[in-house]
Image (cartoon, rainbow, N blue to C red):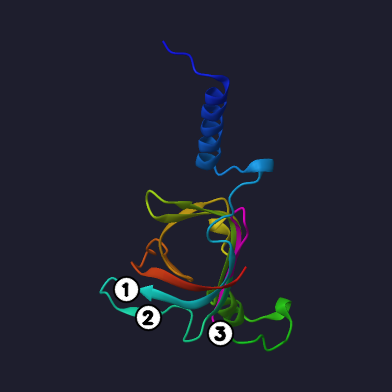
């Protein structure tokens, strides 16, 4: 068995440490690589794909929305129907049943952490809080596509078979 000199052993150790750091995303000082989707995204489309293949606007003709993702993968997401009616009383606590329904059905908001499952080509949302309380504490997987600064993903099918599709454009960091 041939013995290596100290510089060779030191070089081999440095390569091993560098390889482990690269594999885990760690850098000097304990920092990690920034999340690749970090930034501010504006909603371009919020559609529904129907079982017959047709596609409609799920949140009206001009939906509004913002998705913000930080360098660690924490996110906050809001989608709103632009045509939501204002409350006639001007007081959130004094809305009619129809006004409450339009407000709830015309919006979707949630926050938590998101990760990329590269093997399955999915975004995995770990939802901490949501406007729909049944989602809180859930993990939701969504297949996605990323083309430059345009991110789109498909939400799992709803009970009616429709598949929501969200399209976002990166607008800054």
Asked whether the beta carbons under mark 1 and mark 2 sit within 8 Å of each other, the answer is yes
Identify the element where label 1 is drawn. loop
Chain-order first, disc 2 or disc 3:
2
Cα distance between the residues tagged 3 and 1 = 22 Å
Look at the image and say whether residue 32 sits in the magenta stretch. Answer: no
* 137 versus 77 height, above or below: above
Query: Quick check: can you spot residue 130?
Result: no
Q: Quadrant of residue 42?
A: bottom right
Look at the image and say whether residue 75 sits in the magenta stretch. Answer: yes
* 8 versus 2 height, above or below: below
Query: Quick check: can you spot residue 34?
Result: yes
Cα distance between the residues tagged 2 and 3 = 15 Å
Which SS type dominates the magenta stretch?
strand
Which region shows up in magenta? 67-82
The image shows residue 25 at horizontal and vertical percentages of 55, 44
Identify the element where label 2 is drawn. strand
Q: Nearer the viewer, residue 2 or 99?
A: 2
Pointer 3 residue: 82
Chain-order first, disc 1 or disc 2:
1
| 143 relative position to 96: left or right | left
Asked whether the beta carbons under mark 2 and mark 3 sit within 8 Å of each other, the answer is no
Q: Nearer the viewer, residue 95 or 130?
A: 130
Q: Which mark is residue 34?
A: none
Pointer 2 residue: 56
| 147 relative position to 130: left or right | left
| 120 relative position to 150: left or right | left
Cα distance between the residues tagged 1 and 2 = 8 Å
Pointer 1 residue: 50
């Amino acid at each position: 068995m041939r013995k290596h000199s100290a510089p060779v052993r030191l070089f081999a150790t440095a390569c091993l440490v560098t390889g482990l750091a690269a594999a885990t995303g760690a850098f000097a000082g304990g920092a990690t690589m920034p999340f690749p989707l970090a930034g501010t995204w504006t909603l371009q489309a919020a559609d529904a794909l129907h079982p017959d293949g047709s596609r409609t606007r799920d949140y009206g003709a001009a939906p509004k929305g913002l998705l913000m993702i930080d360098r660690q993968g924490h996110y906050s997401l809001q989608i709103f129907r632009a045509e939501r009616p204002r409350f006639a009383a001007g007081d959130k606590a004094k809305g009619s049943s129809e006004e409450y329904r339009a407000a709830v059905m015309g919006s979707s908001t949630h926050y938590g952490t998101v990760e990329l499952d590269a093997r399955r080509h999915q975004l995995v949302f770990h939802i901490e809080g949501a406007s729909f309380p049944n989602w809180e504490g859930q993990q939701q997987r969504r297949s996605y596509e990323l083309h430059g600064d345009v991110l789109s993903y498909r939400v799992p099918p709803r009970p009616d078979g429709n598949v929501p599709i969200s399209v976002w454009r990166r607008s800054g960091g």
